[in-house]
Image (cartoon, rainbow, N blue to C red):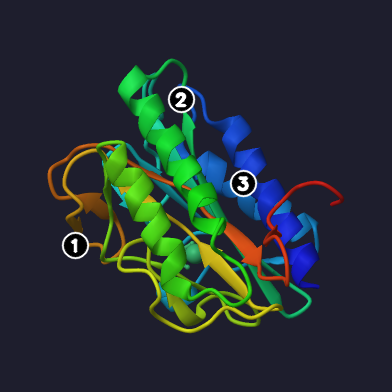
C-alpha cells in the first residue's frame, strides 16, 4: 500500500512538472494534482492538513516551501517547487521537486541541480546501521561546497501511516547523531536549499515560507525505504 501511495505521489509530481510553463496559474497545477490523485483512488495528503487549503504546495522563486496555489501566473524564468502527498490504503507518499519555467538563468539551474544532487549525496548514508544525522551531514557538506545554504527551520521526517512521523530528518548537522536506521523504516528526505542566507520567514498567511533575503530557493524530496542494502526510493513513477 505504501509503495502504491508513493507511486501515485510521484506521478502527481511528474504531472505538475509537465504543467510548469509561462502563462499557467499555480491554482491550475493544484487542480490537476488534486484530480489526478483522486482519480487513482487516493486522497491528497496535504488538503486540510492542519488547515492547509490545497492539494499541492507550489513555491515560486524566493518561496521556499508551503506556497499556497492561487491565481498567480507563472513567468518565463521562474523556478517552481511543487510538493505533493497522496494517501492510499492507509499510507502516505511525500515528494517534491523544483522545475524551470521556460528558460531560466544558469545560476537558478545550478541551484536546482545542486539541490537534487544533495538528496542523492544524503541518501548514500541512508543505510541500516547508520544514524539519521549522517544523511543531513552529507547534504549540508555538498550544498555548502557549492556555495549555497541549507534551510534549518524545516526538516525531513518519518512518513508512513502518518504524513509526519519520527524520526526528524534534518538536512544539516554533525554525523553520528539521532536514531539508528533500521530496515523497513520509511523517511522523507527533503533538502531545501537557498542561494543566499539559510534564514527564512513565514508570511502572515501562516504557511508561505520565503527566504529572508529574497533570493531563490529550491526543494527536492523523495520518500525513501531503508533496507539492509541500498536505500530504495519509493516515490518513483515506474509500475504505477
Ligand atoms: N512535504 C511537506 C512536508 O513534508 C509538505 C507538507 S505541506 C502540509 O511537510 F500542508 F501538509 F503541511
Ligand atoms: Co515531507
* Residue that lies at the very extreme toward the right in this rendered image: 239
In terms of sequence position, does the residue under pointer 2 or pointer 3 come before the other? 3
Residue that numbered label 1 is attached to? 204
- Looking at the image, which residue is at 64% across and 81% down? 182
Residue that numbered label 3 is attached to? 13
Residue 216 against residue 204 in the figure, above or below? above
- Looking at the image, which residue is at 70% across and 76% down? 91
Check contact, mark 2 vs mark 3: CB within 8 A.
no
Q: Residues within 10 Å of mark 2 (few under 14, many from 20)?
A: many
| Quarter assignment of residue 144 | top left
Give me the disc on residue 130.
Answer: none
* Residue that lies at the very extreme toward the top in this rendered image: 103
Q: Residues within 10 Å of mark 1 (few under 14, many from 20)?
A: few
Kindly state the secondary structure of the residue where label 3 is placed: helix
Residue that numbered label 2 is attached to? 101
Q: Is residue 183 in sight in this rendering?
A: yes
Whole-number angstrom distance, CA of label 2 to CA of label 3: 15 Å
- Looking at the image, which residue is at 68% across and 51% down? 10
In terms of sequence position, does the residue under pointer 1 or pointer 3 come before the other? 3
Amino acid at each position: 500500500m505504501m509503495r502504491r501511495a508513493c507511486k501515485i505521489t510521484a506521478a502527481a509530481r511528474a504531472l505538475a512538472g509537465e504543467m510548469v510553463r509561462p502563462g499557467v496559474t499555480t491554482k491550475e497545477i493544484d487542480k490537476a494534482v488534486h484530480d489526478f490523485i483522486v482519480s487513482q483512488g487516493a486522497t491528497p495528503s496535504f488538503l486540510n492538513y492542519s488547515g492547509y487549503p490545497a492539494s499541492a504546495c507550489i513555491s515560486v522563486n524566493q518561496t521556499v516551501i508551503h506556497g499556497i496555489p492561487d491565481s498567480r501566473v507563472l513567468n518565463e524564468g521562474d523556478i517552481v517547487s511543487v510538493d505533493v502527498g497522496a494517501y492510499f490504503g492507509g499510507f502516505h507518499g511525500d515528494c517534491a521537486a523544483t522545475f524551470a519555467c521556460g528558460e531560466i538563468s544558469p545560476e537558478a539551474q545550478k541551484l536546482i541541480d545542486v539541490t537534487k544532487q544533495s538528496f542523492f549525496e544524503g541518501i548514500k548514508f541512508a543505510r541500516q546501521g547508520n544514524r539519521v544525522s549522517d544523511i543531513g551531514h552529507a547534504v549540508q557538506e555538498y550544498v555548502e561546497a557549492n556555495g549555497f545554504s541549507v534551510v534549518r527551520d524545516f526538516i525531513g521526517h518519518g512518513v508512513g501511516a502518518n504524513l509526519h512521523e519520527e524520526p526528524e530528518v534534518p538536512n544539516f548537522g554533525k554525523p553520528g547523531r539521532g536514531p539508528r536506521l533500521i530496515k523497513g523504516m520509511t523517511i522523507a528526505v527533503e533538502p531545501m536549499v537557498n542561494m543566499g542566507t539559510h534564514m527564512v520567514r513565514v508570511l502572515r498567511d501562516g504557511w508561505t515560507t520565503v527566504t529572508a533575503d529574497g533570493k531563490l530557493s529550491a526543494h527536492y524530496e523523495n520518500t525513501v525505504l531503508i533496507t539492509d542494502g541500498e536505500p530504495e526510493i519509493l516515490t518513483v513513477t515506474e509500475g504505477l
